[in-house]
Image (cartoon, rainbow, N blue to C red):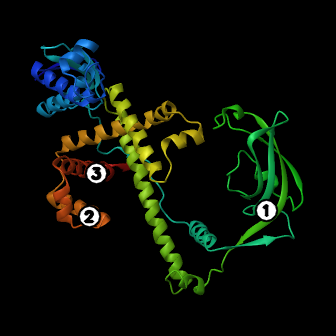
Amino acid sequence: MSLQVENLEHNMAKLTIEAPAEEFEKACQNAYMKQKSRISVPGFRKGKAPRKLIEKMYGAGVFYEDAANELIPEAYRRELDEHKELDVVSRPKIDVTQIEKDKPFIFTAEVALKPPVELGKYKGVKCTKIDTEVKDEEITEKIDEERGRDSRTITVEDRAIKYKDIAVIDFEGFVDGKAFDGGKGTDYELTIGSHSFIDNFEDQLVGHSIGDDVDVKVTFPDEYQEKSLEGKEALFKVKVKGIKEKQLPELDDEYVSDKGFDTVDEYKEDIKKKLATKKENEARAKKEDELIQAIIDDSRMDIPEAMIDTEADNLVENFARRIGSQGMSLDLYMQYTGMTIDRLKNQMTEQAKKNIESRLILEAIVNAEGIAATDEEFDEEVKKMAENYKMEPDKLKDLMGEEESKNMRRDLAMQKAVDLIINEAKEG
């Protein structure tokens, strides 16, 4: 096995990998053993025809494709394991350059290499000061939100629709005077102010009473899941059939006792603490994003397109797993939204580039500062993970491979780099 590296522009490289002729022959024999039961040769039962006879009938290269598919991943992984100085950060683009009997098997892999970073200023970077004080109205809003979850719904008959009501409606939509598919509903319960319907549909129902017929005029967004409706004006014929409202429980000691508090004041104080924690976490996240972007803007790196493309693929795969855990396949999501895999990937591309830039910057700071995770920090992180998995920390550590442990230590070091730039930042 041999490897030659040709450096290309923009941190790309062409790897030429050569596998000995005997390895290629072994892969061809393996392909024959897997396929022979499916190949028909006159005078032989399936699976009994000699390899040489099959090759004579179907051509010398009948097993080459399967042999190459077996040999390429194995040879590629082996070379990267042996040449760890090659920091490959993309999927390889493979091209077979020699595939012949009794000759070495040669292929090329075009890959992106991790780009070097010319690190800009990362200490004392300016960032926006964010107010994290919890206002009284925010406490009230949060309490009303919780009371809303504990509310009961009652029917209203003596007044018109107002905001936050639930209007029970029949509706049918028309574009250019013609009804369109999916634009009709019966006994639909629409919460006014939820913005679940397009444009200002809900606003136009406010003030109307049970029995009213309402013409609601709206415009579909320029980008809409149903392409034929994009940017079109529509008229909805709406019949108001009922009005409901949520009745919130009284905010008193009896109500908060069910939530584990003795008094309303204790309950409010707990809400305030939780909101404060949330605002501080959000402020830190915004500060982190702002600082890292400022450092990116002051640094230089030439990121290969193949690296961005690979990261975008990873984001799509993560998205598919996430919706899969919620019971929806990616194909079904595409069907419902009218999205295509290419459009979804294009939407992920900007985030992919940002992810790469942020990661490279933090890794550069880790290297510049000589930051490393201590054994105590590593053990504490393992302990947290073990609690989530309901396992003993030592058992989890035993199950973790060398690569997983290395990645965890790297992530901990990068988090310490984040702490550094935040602590050194100048707010203003």
User: In this orientation, which residue lies closer to the viewer: 285 or 306?
Assistant: 306
| Three-letter code, disc 3 | Gln
Task: Identify the disc placed on residue 162.
Answer: 1
| Three-letter code, disc 2 | Ala
How far is the residue under mark 3 from the one under mark 1? 49 Å
| Three-letter code, disc 1 | Lys
Rendered view: 165 above or below 230: below
Residue 425: % across, % down: 34, 49
User: In this orientation, which residue lies closer to the viewer: 9 or 51?
Assistant: 51
What residue is rendered at 36% in x and 49% in y? Answer: 426
User: The residue tagged with tag 1: helix, strand or loop?
Assistant: loop
Residue 289: % across, % down: 40, 45
Residues at circles 3 and 1 in contact by the CB criterion of under 8 Å? no
For residue 13, say whether it is visible.
Answer: no
Residue 227: % across, % down: 66, 32
Q: Would you name the residue on which mark 2 appears?
A: 386
Q: Earlier in the sequence, mark 1 or mark 2?
A: 1
User: In this orientation, which residue lies closer to the viewer: 322 or 335?
Assistant: 335
